[in-house]
Amino acid sequence: MVWSKEEAHYRPAPQPAVSCARCKWMFPRLSAGSCKDVRGIVRASDTCDEFEPRHPAAASG
């Protein structure tokens, strides 16, 4: 399912470990790109409720 930014609670990331830059759904991995789950341009420094780490251990700490 593709969400609007509002529906996905898109917002500035509280820490880099949970930012779009570290999410498996962001492409390309630049300062701005697209997301499989969120409509529109996303910034690497932001996050949303659909965040999933590229590497599961990366978000743990």
Image (tube, rainbow, N blue to C red):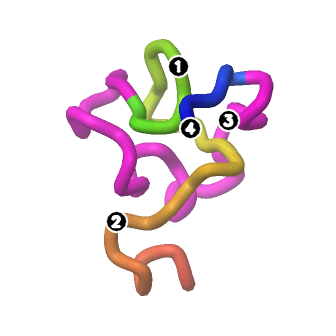
* The disc label shown at residue 12, or none: 3
- Write down the residue under mark 1: 39
Foreground tag (4 vs 2): 4
Q: Amino acid at mark 2?
A: Arg
Instruction: Name above or below for residue 58 compared with residue 33.
Output: below
Foreground tag (3 vs 4): 4
- Write down the residue under mark 2: 54
Q: Amino acid at mark 4?
A: Met
Mark 3–mark 4 distance (CA, rounded to whole Å): 22 Å
Which stretch is magenta? 6-34
x, y percent for residue 39: 53, 19
| 3 or 1: tag closer to the N-terminus | 3
Q: SS at mark 1? A: loop
Crowd class of label 4 (few under 14; some 14 to 19; many from 20; radius 10 Å): few
| 1 or 4: tag closer to the N-terminus | 4
Foreground tag (2 vs 3): 2
Mark 1–mark 4 distance (CA, rounded to whole Å): 10 Å
- Residue 23 forms part of the magenta stretch: yes
* The disc label shown at residue 1, or none: 4
